[in-house]
Image: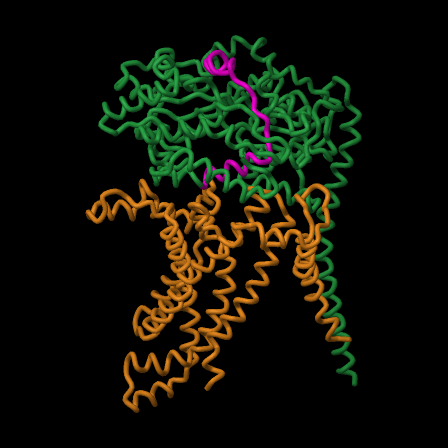
């Protein structure tokens, strides 16, 4: 009886704040509701509409996957290199660690403001520099081109998460026993060879963790695109140019609060995304942890 | 044995205290909700007692969500001079989050204001939710013929019930730069300018002339968004009937004129509300900015604080339009309806409240009586007249712009149409090979994508 009693506080608060909302939103996804009027039970109609009649949903999913394909590999590779480099430093290590983690703890609104100002068409710093250097005749409209808009969002994510990846990798490196390195040194391994054959394999578990969590977080991408397109000001352009920056969560928010007030339909989006997240995390786990199984 | 017993007791005590803490945490939500419910319930009997004329008899606490804290801070003390027993509580809510916050409040049954504001961006959606009381019914018995006729459609839901009053009227014309008009067109007199830009064709021709004379330094509007606000606003026809959305009749002509302007090169490349757009007002790169009576305070003087005397107001080619505007209604389950209505009437309709509102903020009431009873006030210099080169703004709005205005029915699809426009016009700015026709087709497709249940043409 004691274990149950001790677990009870957690179970109760979990049930109230996690389990109940989760179950309730599933029930919502089966109804038609604007948040205020009568709820009507519509069965699976929301799901059927979403999967058969909503081209924007597929587009938003596609956009999200493209942006993930841009930022996950870059953050992983850069994070690992940066961690390796910082780890070797004898002086100023703390300083570099702190500097690199700063973006991660910066307020997202500030990041949105900084980037939309940097990449503004008419007054952005990037365009000003390019034009001054004579690399361009006229500024480029970064935020209204399908590919550069996604690239800028990916850049925001990389910039923000790089420090976090670095810290996690460094934690992993600290855990690698020094005698392995010494043995490698005795055997004549140096520099990149050591990195490739000692550091990287021993960090596999860390990498798997980072890949799987960034797939989960990546599918929920929302802050960066939303803030880039005026989340900090009065004007809100939902989805970026021709919806090329619309992510699944942004679509979800738009359906429930911005363009429409279809809470039921939005819950169906949330549940579909949940299934997709489970699916993609299993795939990413299988792919990244594969080698370990073979060995 | 003894020690085990003590341990057992200790664990039991610990777990019990943990349990109570967690239960208390769960319970506190209910506890929070309860007192507020009782206070408002307690207030209601005293509020409903008083349909009588004596303002002292009305009491209660009225909750308002507003983004304009300055307005409420000024207006509430004025109101309390007449109604000392009504307490008005203001919560500052950003207009961008307003509807979302309201929906969550109503859905969860927690915190809902008695007085609800509907900004033009989400007004149609708010009206469609069915949360506002019909003001023509008891206990309000509002007479819609007491407000300017053109405003009535902006206050009605799709069933034709009048469910809100106007915070202030928002007929709009153009704010223009007097210095630039004088330099390039030889006059900064509004009456002369009206003649120069009497039609959109004349406007475009003048724009090309301006561009040539200034060597491309000065253009007519900062961007496509500004021009569209005017063109769309001038078409007052209703385009929604049930779930039939007729975009072609609504937008074809505005888009054609818009693209004509873009191709003539008289529009800038700024997006609405961006830092560059705001900064352009002080820089003198553009001649015109669409502006309603709230514009001098919120737009022009806010973005060009040094610009006093440099600005003027002129009517748009081919007629007036509305810009922005906030509808104010009462929550249908409010417990203090009379008190809330007393505040709304005082602040937005009564002669006293309107006079204070006009003198302090430049806001113009929708009440017809005010313009009859307070003629002297309108004639006297207003809060921002000096900023606009001594032009009497209120008089110009009332005499030159309001008379030929019509109202436009509100619809829940308005916000979808707006958000589609916001997503598309930067592309039209960037890619000048897109034609008006292609733009309209794309517009229709996008609205269809977002309003799946509607028939869009």
Camera-side residue: B46 or A142? A142
Question: Residue A261 sits in which quadrant?
Answer: top right
Q: Is residue B415 magenta?
A: yes
Determine the image quadrant of residue A233.
Answer: top left
Image x and y of residue A80, in percent = 37, 71
Rendered colour, chain A: orange
Residue interval drawn in magenta: B396-423
In which quarter of the view is residue A197 placed?
A: bottom left
Residue at position x 45%, y 41% in the image: B423
Residue A203 spot, x, y in % from top left: 42, 77
- Asked whether residue B293 is in view, the answer is no
| Chain in green colour | B
Q: Residue at x 21, y 49 (%)?
A: A135
Q: Position of residue A120 (x, y in %)?
A: 34, 44
Q: Quadrant of the N terminus of chain B?
A: bottom right
On the question of residue B248 being in view, the answer is yes
Horizontal arrangement in the rendering, residue B255 relative to residue B358 (left or right)? left
**Which residue is painted at 76% across and 28% down in the image?**
B47
């Amino acid at each position: 009886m004691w274990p149950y009693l001790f677990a009870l506080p957690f179970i109760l608060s979990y049930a109230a704040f996690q389990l109940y909302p989760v179950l309730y939103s599933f029930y919502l996804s089966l109804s038609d509701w604007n948040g205020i009027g009568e709820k009507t039970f519509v069965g699976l109609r929301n799901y059927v509409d979403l999967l058969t009649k909503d081209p924007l949903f597929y587009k938003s999913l596609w956009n999200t996957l493209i942006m993930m394909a841009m930022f996950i590999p870059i953050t992983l590779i850069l994070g690992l290199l940066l961690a390796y480099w910082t780890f070797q430093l004898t002086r100023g290590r703390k300083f570099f660690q702190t500097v690199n983690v700063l973006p991660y703890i910066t307020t997202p609104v500030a990041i949105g403001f900084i980037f939309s100002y940097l990449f503004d068409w008419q007054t952005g710093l990037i365009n000003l520099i390019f034009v001054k250097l004579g690399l361009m005749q006229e500024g480029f409209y970064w935020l209204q081109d399908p590919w550069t808009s996604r690239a800028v969002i990916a850049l925001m994510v990389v910039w923000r998460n790089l420090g976090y990846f670095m810290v996690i990798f460094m934690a992993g490196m600290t855990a690698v026993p020094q005698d392995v390195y010494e043995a490698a040194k005795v055997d004549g391994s140096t520099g990149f060879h050591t990195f490739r054959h000692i550091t990287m394999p021993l960090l596999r578990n860390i990498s798997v963790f980072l890949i799987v969590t960034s797939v989960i977080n990546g599918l929920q991408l929302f802050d960066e695109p939303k803030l880039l397109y005026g989340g900090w000001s009065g004007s809100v352009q939902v989805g970026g140019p021709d919806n090329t920056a619309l992510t699944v969560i942004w679509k979800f928010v738009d359906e429930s609060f911005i363009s429409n007030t279809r809470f039921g339909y939005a819950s169906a989006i949330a549940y579909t995304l949940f299934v997709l997240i489970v699916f993609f995390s299993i795939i990413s786990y299988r792919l990244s942890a594969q080698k370990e199984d073979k060995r | 044995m003894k020690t085990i017993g003590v341990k057992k007791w200790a664990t039991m005590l610990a777990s019990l205290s943990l349990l109570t803490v967690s239960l208390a945490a769960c319970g506190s939500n209910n506890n929070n909700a309860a007192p507020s419910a009782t206070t408002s319930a307690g207030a209601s009997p005293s509020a409903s007692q008083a349909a009588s004329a004596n303002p002292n008899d009305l009491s209660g606490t009225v909750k308002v969500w507003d983004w304009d804290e300055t307005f409420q801070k000024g207006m509430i003390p004025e109101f309390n001079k007449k109604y000392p027993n009504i307490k008005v509580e203001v919560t500052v809510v950003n207009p961008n989050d307003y509807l979302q916050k309201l929906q969550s409040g109503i859905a969860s049954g927690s915190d809902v204001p008695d007085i609800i504001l509907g900004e033009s961006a989400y007004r149609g959606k708010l009206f469609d939710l069915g949360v506002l009381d019909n003001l023509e019914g008891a206990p309000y018995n509002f007479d819609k013929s007491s407000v300017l006729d053109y405003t009535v459609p902006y206050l009605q839901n799709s069933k034709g019930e009048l469910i809100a009053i106007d915070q202030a009227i928002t007929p709009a014309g153009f704010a223009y730069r007097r210095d630039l008009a004088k330099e390039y067109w030889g006059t900064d007199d509004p009456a002369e300018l009206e003649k120069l830009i009497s039609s959109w064709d004349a406007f475009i021709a003048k724009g090309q002339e301006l561009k040539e004379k200034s060597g491309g330094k000065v253009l007519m509007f900062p961007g496509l968004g500004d021009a569209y606000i005017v063109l769309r606003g001038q078409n007052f026809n209703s385009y929604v009937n049930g779930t039939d959305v007729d975009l072609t009749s609504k937008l074809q002509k505005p888009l054609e004129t818009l693209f004509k302007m873009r191709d003539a090169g008289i529009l800038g490349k700024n997006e609405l509300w961006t830092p560059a757009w705001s900064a352009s007002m002080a820089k003198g790169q553009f001649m015109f900015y669409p502006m309603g009576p709230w514009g001098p305070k919120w737009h022009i003087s806010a973005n060009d604080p040094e610009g006093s005397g440099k600005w003027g107001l002129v009517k748009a080619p081919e007629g007036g339009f509305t810009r922005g505007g906030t509808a104010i209604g009462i929550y249908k389950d409010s417990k203090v309806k009379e008190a809330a209505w007393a505040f709304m009437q005082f602040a937005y309709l009564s002669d006293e409240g309107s006079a204070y509102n006009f003198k302090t903020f430049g806001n113009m009431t929708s009440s017809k009586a005010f313009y009859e009873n307070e003629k002297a006030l309108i004639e006297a210099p207003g809060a921002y007249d000096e900023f606009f080169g001594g032009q009497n703004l209120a008089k110009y709005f009332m005499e030159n712009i309001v008379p030929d205005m019509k109202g436009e029915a509100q619809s829940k699809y308005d916000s979808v149409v707006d958000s589609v426009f916001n997503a598309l016009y930067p592309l039209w700015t960037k890619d000048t090979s897109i034609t008006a026709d292609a733009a309209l087709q794309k517009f229709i497709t996008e609205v269809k994508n977002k309003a799946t249940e509607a028939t869009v043409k």
